[in-house]
Amino acid sequence: MSLRINDTVPNFTAETDQGTIKFHDWIGDSWAILFSHPKDFTPVCTTEFGAVAQLADEWEKRGTKVIGVSVDGVEDHKKWKGDIETAGGAKAGFPIIADEGLEVSKAFDMLPAEAYLPDGRTPADSATVRSVFIIGPDKQLKLSMTYPMTVGRNFAEVLRALDGLQMSAKGVATPANWQPGGDVIIPTSVSDEDAKEKFGEFKTVLPYLRTTKAPA
């Protein structure tokens, strides 16, 4: 069964380059981002891990833990981090799950149940392991996105999406192309009277579209 928005994400125990984790315990009360990769020492993925490393301070500001997953082993992960830090110019302090048995990739529906890694495999054998999952402190999936191997992920957009999710947790929605500091949308389930009491001034663009300043 596929993993859908608001489903509780799988809880698993896995080895990482920083030791054994139990996923829900590792998340704790934080937000979390799991980003997956089909193989270590691949060019696009190396730049992506570097981009995540560069944003370390931004993840911390947002109370968010990040963790990678790749279908290679712990020792490869440890060696790969040297390349990641060279490419990204920043320390890769986050853990990387060693998903050699594909348990995590299958649990998150990135690979079919019958998938296996053949001898002499290439990244094409696990190409669909190219996803980002944003998970709330309630351990529920809030957002997912999947990219092909040839298109590098935009982690500035992942950061923006995280900001939008954390804003929506305050009872509002965000419009197209929203950026932090921009106006937000009042849900249609909130009456004008309740909106006035909760948000103060708001603008009615359409009967079903009302905007207001973002709550602090």
Image: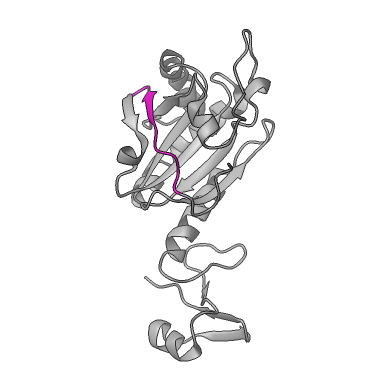
Residue at the image point whose x is 51% and y is 34% from the top: 107
Residue 53 sits above or below residue 210 on the image: above
Say above or below: 133 vs 205: above
Front residue of 123/203: it is: 123
Q: Tell whether 11 sits left or right of 42.
A: left
User: In percent of the image, x 66 and y 21: which residue is there?
Assistant: 125
Asked whether residue 16 is drawn in magenta, I would say: yes
Q: Nearer the viewer, residue 88 or 210?
A: 210
Q: Is residue 111 left or right of residue 214?
A: right
**Residue span colored magenta:** 8-18
Task: Using the rendered view, name the quadrant where residue 81 is placed.
Answer: top left
Taken as a whole, is the magenta stretch helix, strand or loop?
A: loop
Q: How is the image coloured?
A: one colour
Quarter of the image that includes the C terminus? bottom left
Left or right side of 116 for 92:
left
Residue 40 belongs to magenta span:
no
State which quarter of the image contains the N terminus: top right
Tell me which residue sits at (42%, 64%) in the image: 169
Q: Position of residue 155 (x, y in %)?
A: 54, 43
Residue 50, horizontal then vertical, whole percent: 49, 31
Q: Position of residue 184 (x, y in %)?
A: 51, 72
How many marks do you count on the picture? 0
As drawn, the residue found furthest toward the top would be 119
In the image as oriented, which residue stretches furthest toward the bottom? Answer: 193
What residue lies at 65% left-to-right and 27% top-to-bottom? 127
**Position of residue 194 measured from the top left corner of the image (x, y, whole percent):** 43, 87
Residue 208 lies, with reference to residue 83, above or below; the image says below
